[in-house]
Image (cartoon, grey):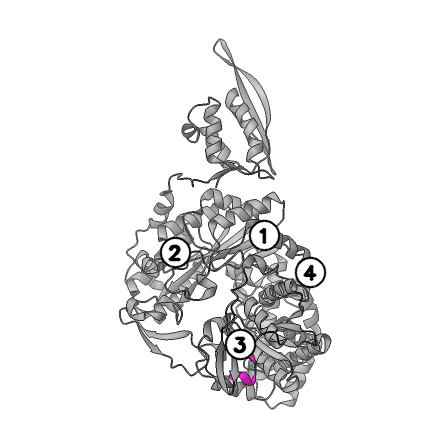
């Protein structure tokens, strides 16, 4: 029998764009000649539920039940005809298929409204001068969330748009609660899910079903799929992998898991899946599987005897997004955080530039696991080949580079290649705020299509940043953030509180640093995360070295990742949560900077020790132009039209060069001495990004001095150099 693989993302991850794991695996299977089909059952379940047909079924179920509804849910139930009438046009609007509906939505007479609209008076303050279309998307999102509230109250308590039964999957050291939920009566959600799964089975006839579980919020959905398959299609092999397994199930001992699954694989899926397919085809023994759990004679057994190494990133193939309903995802606006809006708004093709993290030292991160510790970059040429293929597949040129931290040198090369190929790409990624992100490099990244970056400022305390082994300081973060902002790239800061030994004083000082960063305008978006200790981080593996003590939870054979800990030297971290959240919300809207820090909290806090001009002073302390040894010089503007002018200087006529440049908006002129003007005219074609190798700074210097134009170092300090730099001359 031919091996046929169905790749499934169970509910729920995102509703605006597909999670990429199945596309990565499908691209790899293409290189091996396997037939595969992929499906995002998350978006398919959402579209089935949130339709006229789906809402009729929902309200019919409510009619047949004896559930007592809250006042808010009863309001939605009472307006059921309005919801059924409006749902299909609203969904088409959020799919960008029905844009004119925005006008009706915005006049507040079209949509039925329940509790999510309660704070709508703040809409203009929160969204400012946002256009009609975006305001309508936010209102339509509130409308969907009202329906979500009804579903979670009266139909299925586990429901959520981007997570399903997340509480059951988070810190699930024991399997008991999950199994109890799996044994509960089916709900409208689970029936919809398994109905869609059955459609795929009937259409494609798979012999293997692979369930990708990146987050706790789609573990339950995966197990429901497995439960259905084991009952109705026992001959199909069921495999689970993904980020959840990689971090939570590395010490799996619970045999009941295999009542729902046949195999659980860890880390990168290509090599384990290939070895498993060969085993199922009778071409490999079980003991030669790769990083795979199975139940053998009633016991959980870990098989990792495969002699093959992992598949090199260059050999994994281009992610293949075919089969997915790319035009049916919903572009919603949930909250006003600019980076979170990027996350949930629009269709982004996800692509990895490099496997792992090139830094790999942060003490709070899972640096012991393969997805972090094994760093393997791709070449810029191969990355751009894949970009072109994915644009051809999807018709979309938006990319989210999903690296742990994108390396500056690789980003430089990718940006050069994008520009060289004249590709139109819009992209964003995660970075470290390191000094190699110079102002010139940021301008190059912007020219290639970069619109936003996110990076970890974390605690905004130099003592704790050093203890975290972040390899950055707050002052350095400020300078790098300013360089991105000046280039027109939005900056989002991941912020952390509650790191081991963090004091109340350090928390308040961190808040002051954050306040100054937003007031200076160099960071536009941020989010505070509470520190979480994980089993695979240096803190989790050596808690005593960080002056904390692990206090649980007890391992019950299933998941083992999130750890409870005691921090005797630290502050009462939880008390700061609400004040940090409120202050940041205001700072992101450009208000509250003059508000005393203590006023954000309802308990006594120490005054900050940070000077009020610390960030501004740090930004002014720019690093000297210490260019890399392999730096290249680029000209991002047009080629000049050169004219020779005769200038009267006393009795003497002097020849001068006038170089006229045209850019997208205007024209400008540069006047120089004739020899320098002629030299610039001759070298500028070599500085434009093209098929030739970029001109190195060393070669440019040698050519300048060989032409008898004097010291190149002095030229780099001249007004001519400054004007050229302002208008598109980059050294990267």
Task: Assess whether mark 2 and mark 3 are in contact (beta carbons under 8 angstroms).
Answer: no
Cβ atoms at labels 2 and 1 below 8 Å apart = no
Counting other residues with Cα less than 10 Å from the Cα at mark 1, is it few (<14), some (14-19), or many (20 or more)? Answer: some
Q: In this figure, which residue is indicated by the disc labeled 2?
A: 515
Q: Are circles 1 and 3 on residues that touch, CB within 8 Å?
A: no
Q: Residues within 10 Å of mark 3 (few under 14, many from 20)?
A: many
Give residue 264's mark: 3
Determine whether the residue tagged by mark 4 lies in a helix, strand or loop.
loop
Residue farthest along the right direction in this orientation? 203
Q: Nearer the viewer, mark 4 or mark 1?
A: 1
What residue is at 68 percent from the left and 58 percent from the top?
A: 393
310 vs 676, nearest the viewer: 310
> Above or below — where is 71 with respect to 589?
below
Q: Earlier in the sequence, mark 1 or mark 3?
A: 3
Q: Find the distance from the CA under tag 3 to the CA under tag 2.
A: 46 Å
Report x, y in % for residue 510: 34, 59
Residue for badge 4:
99
How far across and down, in percent of the image, does residue 249 sit? 47, 76
Residue 718 rendering spot, x and y as whole percentages: 43, 29
Mark 3 or mark 4: whose residue is earlier in sequence: 4
The answer to whether residue 259 is magenta is yes
User: Is 704 inside the magenta-drawn segment?
Assistant: no
Q: CA distance from mark 4 to mark 2?
A: 38 Å
Residue 675 at what x, y percent from top left? Answer: 51, 21
Horizontally, residue 267 falls left or right of residue 26, namely left
**Which range is magenta?**
257-263
Measured in 3D between alpha carbons, the distance from the residue under mark 4 to the one under mark 1, in whole angstroms, is 37 Å
Residue 670 lies left or right of residue 36; in this view the side is left
Q: Is residue 12 visible?
A: no
């Amino acid at each position: 029998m031919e091996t046929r693989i169905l790749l499934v993302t169970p509910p729920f991850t995102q509703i605006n764009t597909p999670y990429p794991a199945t596309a990565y695996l499908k691209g790899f299977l293409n290189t091996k000649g396997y037939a595969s089909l992929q499906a995002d059952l998350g978006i398919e379940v959402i579209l089935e539920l949130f339709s006229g047909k789906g809402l009729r079924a929902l309200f019919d179920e409510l009619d047949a039940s004896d559930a007592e509804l809250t006042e808010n849910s009863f309001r939605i139930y009472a307006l059921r005809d309005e919801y059924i009438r409006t749902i299909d046009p609203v969904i088409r609007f959020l799919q960008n298929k029905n844009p004119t509906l925005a006008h009706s939505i915005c006049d507040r007479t079209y949509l039925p409204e329940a509790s999510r609209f309660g704070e709508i008076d703040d809409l203009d303050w929160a969204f400012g001068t946002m256009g009609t279309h975006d305001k309508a998307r936010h209102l339509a999102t509130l409308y969907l969330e009202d329906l979500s509230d009804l579903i979670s109250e009266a139909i299925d308590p586990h429901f959520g748009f981007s997570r399903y039964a997340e509480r059951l999957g988070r810190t699930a050291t024991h399997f008991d609660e999950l199994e109890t939920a799996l044994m509960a009566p089916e709900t409208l959600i689970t029936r919809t899910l398994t109905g869609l799964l059955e459609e795929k089975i009937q259409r494609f006839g798979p012999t293997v079903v692979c369930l990708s579980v990146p987050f706790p919020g789609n573990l339950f959905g995966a197990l429901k799929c497995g439960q259905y398959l084991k009952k109705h299609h026992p001959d199909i092999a069921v495999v689970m992998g993904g980020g959840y397994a990689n971090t939570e199930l590395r010490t799996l001992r619970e045999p009941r898991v295999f009542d729902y699954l046949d195999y659980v694989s860890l880390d990168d899926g290509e090599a384990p899946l290939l070895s498993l397919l060969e085993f199922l085809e009778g071409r490999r023994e079980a003991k030669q599987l790769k990083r795979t759990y199975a139940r053998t004679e009633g016991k959980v057994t870990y098989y990792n005897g495969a002699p093959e190494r992992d598949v090199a990133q260059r050999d994994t193939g281009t992610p293949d997004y075919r089969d997915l309903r790319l035009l049916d995802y919903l572009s919603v606006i949930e909250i006003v955080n600019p980076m979170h809006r990027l996350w949930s708004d629009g269709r982004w093709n996800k692509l990895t530039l490099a496997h792992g993290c090139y830094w790999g030292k942060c003490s709070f991160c899972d640096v012991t696991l393969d997805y972090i510790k094994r760093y393997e970059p791709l070449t810029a040429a191969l990355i751009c080949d894949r970009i072109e293929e994915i644009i051809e597949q999807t018709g979309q040129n938006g990319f989210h580079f999903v690296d742990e931290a994108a390396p500056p040198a690789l980003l430089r090369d990718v940006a050069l290649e994008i520009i060289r190929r004249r590709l139109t790409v819009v992209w964003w990624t995660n970075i470290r705020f390191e000094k190699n992100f110079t102002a010139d490099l940021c301008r190059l990244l912007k020219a290639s299509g970069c619109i936003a970056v996110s990076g970890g400022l974390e605690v905004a305390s130099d003592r704790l940043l050093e203890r975290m082994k972040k390899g950055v300081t707050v002052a350095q973060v400020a300078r790098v953030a300013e360089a991105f902002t000046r280039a027109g790239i939005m900056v989002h800061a991941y912020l952390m509180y509650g790191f081991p030994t963090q004091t109340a004083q350090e928390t308040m000082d961190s808040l002051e640093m954050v306040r100054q960063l937003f007031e200076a305008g160099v960071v536009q978006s941020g989010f505070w995360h509470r520190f979480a200790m994980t089993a695979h981080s240096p803190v989790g593996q050596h808690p005593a070295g960080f002056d904390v003590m692990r206090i649980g939870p007890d391992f019950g054979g299933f998941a083992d990742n999130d750890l409870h800990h005691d921090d005797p030297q630290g502050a009462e971290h939880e008390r700061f949560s609400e004040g940090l959240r409120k202050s940041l919300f205001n700072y992101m809207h450009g208000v509250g900077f003059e508000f005393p820090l203590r006023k954000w909290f309802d308990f006594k806090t120490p005054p900050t020790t940070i000077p009020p001009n610390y960030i501004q002073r740090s930004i002014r302390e720019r690093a000297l132009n210490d260019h890399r040894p392999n730096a290249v010089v680029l000209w991002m503007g047009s080629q000049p039209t050169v004219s020779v002018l005769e200038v009267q200087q006393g009795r003497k006529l002097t020849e001068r060069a006038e170089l006229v440049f045209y850019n997208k908006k205007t024209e400008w002129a540069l006047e120089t001495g004739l020899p320098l003007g002629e030299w610039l005219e001759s070298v500028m074609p070599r500085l434009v990004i093209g098929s030739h190798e970029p001109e190195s700074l060393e070669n440019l210097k040698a050519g300048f001095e060989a032409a008898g134009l004097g010291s190149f170092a002095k030229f780099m300090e001249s007004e001519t150099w400054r004007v050229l730099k302002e208008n598109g001359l980059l050294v990267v």
